[in-house]
Image (cartoon, helix red, strand yellow):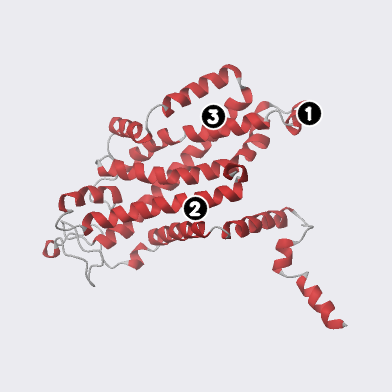
Amino acid sequence: MPQPTTHLASNRTGLGYWLTSPDPRGRLQASAQQFYQGWVQFRSHPMGLVGLALILLLVVMAVAAPLLTKYDPIMQDFTVRLAPPSAEHWFGTDNFGRDVYSRIIYGARTTIYIVMLVTVIIAPIGLLIGTCSGYFGGWVDEVLMRITDIFLSFPGLVLALGFAAALGPGITNAIIAISLTAWPPIARLARAETLSLRQADYIAAIRLQGASAGAIILRHILPMCIPSVIVRVTLNMSGVILTAAGLGFLGLGAQPPAPEWGSMAATGREFMIDSPWVIAAPGLAIAAISLAFNLFGDALRDVLDPRGSE
């Protein structure tokens, strides 16, 4: 019976067996299996796949913008001012004759830029403050959490408006303003995770071995908080996008003539009756991407943090 033996041997050497083997050999295989199992769980959420597809579409739009449109997003042409959607201008033109579709495509770059920088800023800050507060307790916890409560006591958009107004208009100042208002929920989450971990037996054993508080936090507690923080950051991205669009709408974000969805909506509101496409296109783009991050975050929560979905 050589054929079944050959078939069995091939099954034991293929990529599928390597990803599902009950006995992983090495850290690389174990990590790959964990990622594969997470992907299998994620695929069972159709709406999460829709959200992921929209996010990937946003990334493709941002990267391949010059290939997706032939129009310069800031080039004005008053001969086609407020032209309706057509084969030449898919989403019509605005009050300066600029192609709305082109501005939507290039505006994706601004959205990606804001999302990436805000994530890079708020995740480490929230993690560090939350884990230190939960691990040390006492006056450290009181000081850090009272500062966090001060930030949480104001609506995020109102606080971001205050910071943006103080810092001045501009996309860099808008990112700073959004970051200053987006880290407190992450700090709260990291603190709650740390409170449940600091009394664990393995932490006590590490402490008895003479490990310093900094080493325990950085090497053993902080990595355990990362999955929950990733989920929280993903779910917060819709709020970040809406806040950035709100700042742009009020003239405190990206400045004209840069293509930014919030500022485009602000310009389009003057023509929403006679030329609704000017405001409809950026409005739908903001709504679609915000919904995408919510759908993706909900599915990711079930994969990385099953306790959050119970």
> Real-space Cα distance between discs 3 and 1?
25 Å
Left or right of 197 on screen, residue 242:
left
Which numbered disc, 3 or 2, marks the residue that appears first in the sequence?
3
- In the rendered image, the quadrant that contains the C terminus is top right
Tell me which amino acid carries mark 3: Ile
Q: Residue at x 83, y 79 (%)?
A: 4
> Real-space Cα distance between discs 1 and 2?
41 Å
Q: What residue does disc 1 label?
A: 209
Q: Residue at x 57, y 20 (%)?
A: 140
Tell me which amino acid carries mark 2: Phe
Q: Nearer the viewer, mark 1 or mark 2?
A: 2
Is residue 290 among the parts visible in the rendering?
A: yes
Q: Secondary structure at mark 1?
A: loop
Residue 296: which disc?
2
- In the rendered image, the quadrant that contains the N terminus is bottom right
Considering only vertical position in the picture, is 298 above or below 210? Answer: below
Left or right of 234 on screen, residue 69:
left
Q: Secondary structure at mark 2?
A: helix
Q: Residue at x 28, y 44 (%)?
A: 248
> Real-space Cα distance between discs 3 and 2?
26 Å
Q: Quadrant of residue 7?
A: bottom right
| Mark 1 Cα-neighbour bin, 10 Å: few <14, some 14–19, many ≥20 | few
Residue 127: which disc?
none
Is residue 112 among the parts visible in the rendering?
A: no
| Mark 3 Cα-neighbour bin, 10 Å: few <14, some 14–19, many ≥20 | many
Considering only vertical position in the picture, is 118 above or below 136? Answer: below
Tell me which amino acid carries mark 1: Gln
Q: What residue does disc 3 label?
A: 129
Which numbered disc, 1 or 2, marks the residue that appears first in the sequence?
1
Q: Quadrant of residue 171?
A: top left
